[in-house]
Image (cartoon, rainbow, N blue to C red):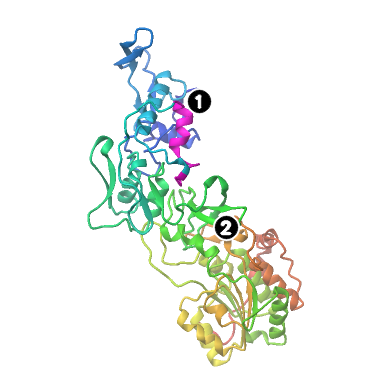
Amino acid sequence: MSTFKLDDRTIEFQPGDTVIQAAHRAGIDIPHYCWHPGLSVAANCRMCLVEVKPPPGRPALMLSVLHWDEEQHEYVDQKKPKLQPACQLGASEGMEVMSQTSEHVARARAAVQELLLLNHPVDCPICDQAGECRLQDYWLEHQGTKKRMRDEVIHKPKAQVFGPTIVYDAERCIICTRCVRFSAEVAKDPVLDVRERGNLNEIVVSPGRELDHPYTLMTEYVCPVGALTSRDFRFKARVWFLRSVRSVCVGCATGCNAFTDYDPRSQEVHRYRPRENLEVNQYWMCDEGMLDYRRIHDGRILHARVEGERTSVEAAAKKAAKLLKGVPADHIAVVLSAEHSNEDNFALLTLARDYLGTGHLFVSGRPSGEGDDVLRHRDKNPNTAGVTAMCTSTPPLSMPVLFKSLEEGRITHVVALGSQLPDADKAPGFRRCKALIAVSTHDGPIPEHASVVLPASSWAESDGTFVSANGLAQQSERAIRPLGDSQPAFRLVTALGAALGHSLSFKQVADVQRAMAPDAGAALEGNATPAGISP
């Protein structure tokens, strides 16, 4: 592979790479504001200026500049090499680039930083970007001097509502145009633009429009300063109090990689942020996914219920076991859930096939929704592919088949994982069964009609594996402790099995994952399609 030299390091690059792209891939940060690896090059912030050594025998291109001489107390002529923006400079074999080792680059970056801060308000104490703001970071790294301008700063509009999710502060904006390019290039909705010139520049929304495409929160996320703020996160938390885990978005079948940011003191999740994965979501997430963290706390089932009355998990498991004991296996149906992880589904599948002896398998999940050709998938469940792949010899049937079997009396008892149904209007069909045991995270059609409800933890309260629509299995890490009396669903299934007199050994998620290993694949094989039930 071709290489060039950056300061004292040899950097590999691919054909078509710019210097900053190759450095970014090598884990080296060249300071920048406007450049983003997923957007076109603007080269307007000039923070990524670098010095390129000329080839042997060729003089460097020099520029005449005025420099203040402290001894003579006047400006004097000086020469300096012409610096180039690394985001626009194509990498070539054998070139030598100076980023951290050039005095001229250091002075240029300090000047750029000072220029950007001339009119910038000192909003850091009240700005949501504080703690993750590049203006703060680069001031420390590349400037570190007090403000010299004593004139009144240029005042611009503050707290402008751009749309349902975004508030804009023009005084903080450095006109990097990341938001403009993202809306046009990724979201395919060029609703933002720049007006005026020089220090009067500001971002505006097209006349008669709002910033309301499905990816508006990404315009806030790509903003390197505090100009664009999320109405959802605004003034709710300080980032230095938050901790992060690597998670997978459960808002649809795309399986976008994300960071879950939570406060360990209150055990509250405050936001999702996209996590780079070029094979799945690149650098982006949609608004639905970024706001889906709310379901971790909203609409939750946090306590066990028997016939609508609150009780302990142990008492509810015993009641469920009492309802199932003595029931012929052919009369029991088990509903897997595309909302839940592979581990949760595998535990229930093991209980169904190895202990209850039933092969009547069905799958439920959230209803389909709107999709697009960017990231949003019509399947609003994170693990449809995982549940389907798990049932290799006997694919789970759809919920209408179950309701038909309930109506005809072939199924009398149901054990269901999950909360939602693809068609909630069909939920009254559960009234025809003698007992419905629900292992649910949220209120919904399934627990609403259940005789016994066991409170399952959310995806943020347990490690788990989800398989995207493209068949990619991805791990999601636990962020917070289980809320209320909830437990990971695989533990609730284990408790139900114990109450039935069966010994499932799933105490930790690692136990389930070991059982799911290829050498344990026989647990998922060799079951014929149940007699009397067909799609």
Locate residue 423, reporting x and y percent: 45, 78
Q: Nearer the viewer, residue 303 or 17?
A: 303
- Residue 214 is drawn in which quadrant? bottom left
Secondary element at image label 1? strand
Q: Nearer the viewer, residue 235 or 184?
A: 235
- Tell me if I can see residue 232 in this picture: yes
Q: Identify residue for label 2.
A: 268
Question: Which segment did they paint magenta?
Answer: 126-145
Locate residue 29, reporting x and y percent: 47, 33
Q: Dot 2: few (<14), some (14–19), or many (≥20) neighbours within 10 Å? A: some
* Residue at the image point whose x is 48% and y is 55% from the top: 256
Locate residue 262, reporting x and y percent: 56, 53
Q: Is residue 59 magenta?
A: no
Which residue type carries mark 2? Answer: Glu
Q: Identify residue for label 1.
A: 9
Label 1–label 2 contact, CB within 8 A: no
Q: Dot 1: few (<14), some (14–19), or many (≥20) neighbours within 10 Å? A: few
Q: Is residue 96 left or right of residue 501?
A: left
Q: Is residue 384 left or right of residue 351?
A: left
* Residue at the image point whose x is 40% and y is 27% from the top: 109
* Residue at the image point whose x is 45% and y is 52% from the top: 234
- Residue 116 is drawn in which quadrant? top left
Which residue type carries mark 1? Answer: Arg
Q: Is residue 325 left or right of residue 151?
A: right
| Above/below status of 415 relative to 143 | below
Residue furthest bottom as drawn: 408
Locate residue 246, reporting x and y percent: 56, 51
Residue furthest top as drawn: 72
The CA distance from mark 1 to mark 2 is 43 Å
What's the mark number on residue 154?
Answer: none
- Residue 135 is drawn in which quadrant? top left
| Above/below status of 159 relative to 136 | below
